[in-house]
Image: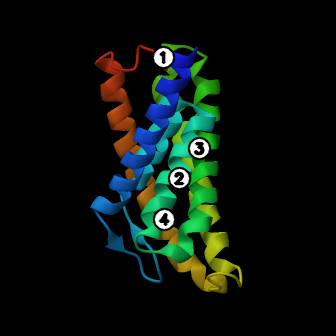
Amino acid sequence: MLDRKLRLLSMTALFAALTTLLTLVIRVPSPLSGYLNLGDCGVLLSAWILGPVPGCLAAGLGSMAADLLGYPLYAPGTLVIKGLMALAAGALFRLLRQKGPAHLFPALLASGAAGELIMTAGYFLYEAVPFPVGLGLGALVNVPFNLVQGGFGLTCAGAVYLSLSRAGALARRL
């Protein structure tokens, strides 16, 4: 029991670090603020591999850590947005995965898309409200960039997950 909890805690910390690194490795600035990055790949992998709650912690903390290193104004919003993104994606993936191995790809696609929609809506709301960013409807300019980031993150995470699954690396449960 303790071994399982320790392994899960270690994996959660590793996925938080991975998410931070993926967010910081490639940064393409978006028009108003923020940047396109690979962080969503880490967020979705956290959700799918660790499950909803540990994935939420890893995704939220890892993404927030990256923001603290460059965009601290976004750090509180990122903690909540990326955490909710992983929570939803992990829960939906777990639910859809119960239908059997033939449903792996649809489960990845549906849960990842749901998570990315949460991310896009979350950042729009965070940027549109008067505090802390306060761009109003001008925040709509970043929506297409967040959708592109989401699509890229989903594609990257899906490819990695499918590769790990086919290699048997995900057969052992945490």
- Residue for badge 4: 146
- Judged from the image, the secondary structure of the residue bearing numbered disc 1 is loop
Q: CA distance from mark 4 to mark 1?
A: 32 Å
Tell me: residue 164, above or below residue 65. above
Asked which quadrant contains residue 56, the reply is: top right
Asked if marks 3 and 2 touch (Cβ < 8 Å), the reply is no
Most foreground residue, 4 or 116: 4
Query: How far separated are the C-alphas under marks 3 and 2?
Result: 8 Å
* Residue at (61% x, 17% y) in the render: 98
Q: Earlier in the sequence, mark 1 or mark 3?
A: 3
- Amino acid marked by disc 2: Leu
Residues under labels 4 and 3: Cα distance?
Answer: 19 Å
- Disc ID at residue 173: 1
The residue at which mark 3 appears reads as 56
Cα distance between the residues tagged 4 and 2: 19 Å
| CA gap, disc 1 and disc 3 | 18 Å
Mark sitting earlier along the chain (4/2): 2
Q: Position of residue 58 (x, y in %)?
A: 51, 44
Q: Earlier in the sequence, mark 4 or mark 3?
A: 3
Check disc 2 and report the residue beneath it: 61
